[in-house]
Amino acid sequence: MVNVTDSLSHSRGHRKKRDKVKTSVKRALITGITGQDGSFLAELLLAKGYEVHGMVRRASTFNTERLDAIYADPHEHGAKLFLHYGDSSEGAGIRHILEAAQPEEIYNLAAQSHVRVSFDQAEYTANVVATGALRILEAVRDYAARGHAVRLYQAGSSEMFGASPPPQNESTPFYPRSPYGVSKLAAHWYAVNYREAYGLFVANGILFNHESPRRGETFVTRKITRALARIKLGLQDKLYLGNLEARRDWGYAGDYVEAMWRILQQPEAEDFVIATGESHSVREFLERAADYCGVPWQRHVERDSRYFRPTEVDNVCGDASKAREKLGWAPKVKFEELVAMMMEHDLELARQQATLASAGHRVSGRGASQS
Ligand code: NAP
Ligand code: G4F
């Protein structure tokens, strides 16, 4: 497990060391580094030779599991990944981290990112997602005024399009359908405003759904692959789902973090839609995953009204022509490969759990009924 150093004591030492030895290594700060995208982006930037700093919120349990593969103790010579405690709900901490890390690129990925949960925790979602982005912008504005050349990526979402019919591109009117979508839209417009008002390099990525084996277990794709694998291995019997008819444009997270990086390498700050241009229903995802592992899903899947949303986004499908032309970006992983990759990963996890269970150990029963 990763050990997050105390932000201030660590950061001061780190800055002193760097002040002595000026290097040409690029420094990036990622908020939300412990999430799905944050972990992929950290890997990408480290592979490109960046020094990577991540903002991690304090939790009573380890929340850095997705970073285990790339973490090295910051005291070790040549360490390139540094973690700092911070939270999007607190501006002072963000400013301390900027001072400590002195990044040239900032990726603001931190969010309460679950749409269904945003209906239950609307005020909190707005605080973290909308005002959280504003806090970063205010900190960046002061940081830039002190002479730092800095570029900021703001993680926008296809949820901002909401009820606007597909295909959606950069000119499509926004019509969000959840507190999460509204909050992301506020963050989007804050970013545009700070770009225009203060000449800051701030770019919005408007990303459509992207998944991976690291996807949080309560998003529908991972909920399905995890549950089907457990059903296949006899670890659970039922999978409770909501709306199977909603359509999403699902890509692979590894491809999408490459787009984030390219957005910040442009000569001018601009906003980009990032998508595959192909949409599938939740039912299609379920059928494809069940076929892959040979589970007769109709026998195991039940509907639960808890997983329906008061207002749904029925159909999103992105047009990423601008990204293709200006960023030279195109998704590599196709829908079928994505389903297979996620199924394989969750089958392996289920096999490990089944082995433990057959040896008499207790394994977690959670899985059938999560958001
Ligand atoms: P994720 O897996 O849910 O990760 C969210 C990250 O934000 C985690 O590191 C989480 O920390 C952190 N976070 C949550 N609340 C925070 C707070 N109050 N202060 C600081 N950090 C906080 O999300 P993701 O899929 O990687 O998505 C990354 C970003 O892209 C998010 O902003 C999301 O809304 C947006 N986005 C995602 C998609 C998608 O399909 N994945 C599409 C469009 C936009 P913990 O690990 O401690 O929870
Ligand atoms: O997997 P989901 O929860 O993702 P959603 O709502 O599209 O949001 C994700 O993608 C956005 C990109 O546009 C991100 F901005 C956001 O942060 C997040 O990463 O739900 C997908 C669809 C929905 O229509 C939902 O109603 O699946 C449907 N669904 C059906 N049953 C379910 C379930 N969703 C969840 N989470 N759980 C269910 O049991």
Image: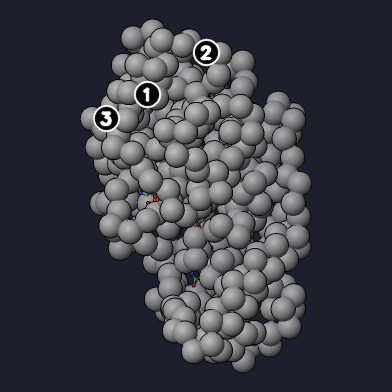
Front one among 331 and 284: 331
Disc 3 is placed on an element classified as helix
Q: Quadrant of residue 187?
A: top left
In this rendered view, identify the residue nearer to me: 254 or 220.
254
Q: Quadrant of the C terminus?
A: bottom left
Q: Residue at x 37, y 56 (%)?
A: 62
| Residue 362 in the image, given as x and y percentages of width and height | 44, 84
- What amino acid type should be assigned to the residue bearing mark 1? His
Q: Earlier in the sequence, mark 1 or mark 3?
A: 3
- Residue 20 lies left or right of residue 335; in this view the side is left
Q: Which residue is mark 1?
A: 14
Are there few (<14), some (14-19), or many (20+) residues within 10 Å of tag 2? few
Q: Position of residue 311 (x, y in %)?
A: 42, 63
Up the image or down, 116 lies above or below 29; here it is below
Q: CA distance from mark 2 to mark 1?
A: 13 Å
Instruction: State yes or no: Cβ of the residue under disc 1 lies below 8 Å from any atom of ligand 1.
Output: no
**Residue furthest bottom in the image:** 299
Earlier-in-chain disc, 2 versus 1: 1
* Residue at x 61%, y 22% (from the top left corner): 265
As measured in the structure, the alpha-carbon distance from the residue carrying label 1 to the one carrying label 3 is 9 Å
Q: Which residue is mark 2?
A: 23
The three-letter amino acid code for the residue at tag 2 is Thr
Please name the residue shown 64% across and 29% down the image: 48
Secondary structure type for disc 1:
helix
Q: Amino acid at mark 3?
A: Ser
Question: Is residue 70 among what the camera can see?
Answer: yes
Rendered position, 366 above or below 147: below
The answer to whether mark 1 and mark 3 are in CB contact below 8 A is no
Please tell me the numbered disc located at residue 9: 3
Residue at the extreme top: 147
Q: Is residue 273 visible?
A: no
Q: Which mark sits nearer the N-terminus, 2 or 3?
A: 3
